[in-house]
Image: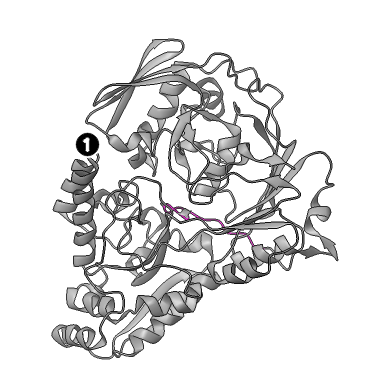
Amino acid sequence: MKDIVGNVSRRAFLKTGAALGGGLVAGMPLSQAIWAAEGKVLKARSYVDLATLDPGFYSASAEIDVMYCLYSKLTHYKAGSEWGWELEAAERMEQVDPTHIRFHLKKGIRFTGGHGEITAKDVKFSFERVIKHNSPIKPDWGPFDHVEIEDDYTGVIVFKAPFVPVWNVAFPYGVGHIVSEDAVMKATGDGSTFGLKPPAFSGPYVLADWKAKQYTLLTRNPDWSGPKPGFDEIRIIPISDEKTAERAYQAGDVDFTLISLDSLSTFKSNPPADTKVEEHPSLYYYWIGMNIDHPKLKDINVRKAIQWAIDVPQILDAAFAGQAEVATGTIPPGIVGHRDKALVPPEGDLAKAKEFLEEAGVNDLTLTIDCLNESLFSSIAQTVQAQLSQIGITVQVNVQDSGSFWTLGMESEGDRWKEMQLSLMSFSSLPDPHYATSFFVQNQVGVWNWERFRSERFDELSAKGVTINDPNERGNVYQEMQDLMEESGAYRFLTHGGNPVMYRTTRTQAPTRPDGYPLFLEFRPV
């Protein structure tokens, strides 16, 4: 999810894009135009602007990168090439039984603003408010029920049923962040979302300033008593387009950025001065989605015709310079539940696609495809447009800014979902198959399930998969779930992309998660 990106990743997620021009403002580098570079300052690029800083209601993985600096959580992801987690605010954690997890907090972690020390009450409040206020990302918690408080520093997290993904998803990522009950209740009155106005912090940094579509500025937290972070300030510039981000890096406006796959070979062979280029696998997944409820796409034969007409390797050559691998589903290699191959071969088959159209009795079909207004997505959409024309389907490409695009399929945002036909989607993900499948259950229709895919068997498997510890047995469940998605005709899986990064070795060390996303607290000046 939904980043996610990416996302998205998730998932996707509501993205509020940011546009940065050529890297110069009035003839001056942006970094100088906005601020004076004093002290130890990290300048990094984010792929999206902030939509919220409330961890119980996050919408993009880039927001988590910032929250990681501002709040504390029981555990966090380790830096490196292998996925794993380690204790953070928790001194110890214990799986008491399949539905109970006991935690014991470290003492002395304090909230800013005089809101006291982090206690088990704050953990209870932080976790339960996600469910109480029906947050869009409550699936991260699965069948979580409540937290029982044993003393000021000890509590037991109680689930209605076993939930294996909690260790790889909820605790170390977004909803695992702990906020101050006292501060949030005073700020909101009912514990609902505080959006972009955090009332208190407990991490090594505080939010000093945020200007929409310009920058986020973090400075040291004077109340922080833990290990000292490497930089006095972290300045994050939101740049949605990777090509623009690459120009900003070359102009000296940022010292760390993800780069596009089609630029990878160029930067590897001829990197900017004092720059290290690293390649990382991505957990993102890209696909073409089809709105099953739209009259033009109700017939499964029409959807299957589209599936078989799309040549995925051709798309990857056009949009990713051949640097990305074909996806077999939503779950990437190395994660439990990855399929060795998809049901529809990557190259498709135009003859078979035409047979499905004939079976549907459809001629002169005209469709729309919605996509983000970024060069990567435009390239993919235009390639699909050309491919579908080969079977007589005319496609109109509707390019949308991120604020508009990421509300298209949401029933809460009006009736635009009724007009959706094809959509080019990308969600970010996490190192657990539940995260790559949980947004396609029936109760997500009109939320993040924009294909409006409905399957009782899929929902049954989704509930079963989170209870299984054995990786082989669990993998079989998620492989069948992806089969069901593909058999519906509503999905054409494309790629997981990749997450190459580059950073200035004279300015910083840059530890990341295995998928290349920055762990800013681990960054150290050189």
Residue under label 1? 467
Is 62 situated left or right of 57 in this image? Answer: right
Vertical placement of 109 versus 454: above or below? above
Tell me if residue 10 is in the magenta stretch.
yes
Q: Position of residue 282 (x, y in %)?
A: 45, 56
The reply to whether residue 321 is visible in this rendering is yes
Residue for point 82% across, 38% down = 39
Where disc 1 sits, the SS reads loop
Q: What type of secondary structure mainly makes up the magenta span? A: loop
Residue for point 18% across, 83% down = 356
Tell me if residue 171 is in the magenta stretch.
no
Is 52 situated left or right of 97 in this image? Answer: right
Q: Nearer the viewer, residue 59 or 94?
A: 94
**Hey, which quadrant is residue 187 in on the image?**
top right
How many numbered markers are drawn?
1
Residue for point 18% across, 44% down = 473
What's drawn in magenta, residue-wise?
A: 6-19
Q: Position of residue 357 (x, y in %)?
A: 20, 85
Vertical placement of 133 versus 155: above or below? below
Q: Position of residue 267 (x, y in %)?
A: 64, 67
Residue for point 32% across, 38% down = 165
Q: Position of residue 497 (x, y in %)?
A: 45, 63
Q: Nearer the viewer, residue 478 or 35?
A: 478
Report the colour scheme.
Answer: one colour
Q: Quadrant of the C terminus?
A: top right
- Mark 1 residue type: Thr
The reply to whether residue 295 is visible in this rendering is no
Q: Residues within 10 Å of mark 1 (few under 14, many from 20)?
A: some
Q: Nearer the viewer, residue 265 or 85?
A: 265
Is 232 situated left or right of 195 in this image? Answer: right
Vertical placement of 217 versus 1: above or below? above
Vertical placement of 23 versus 476: above or below? below
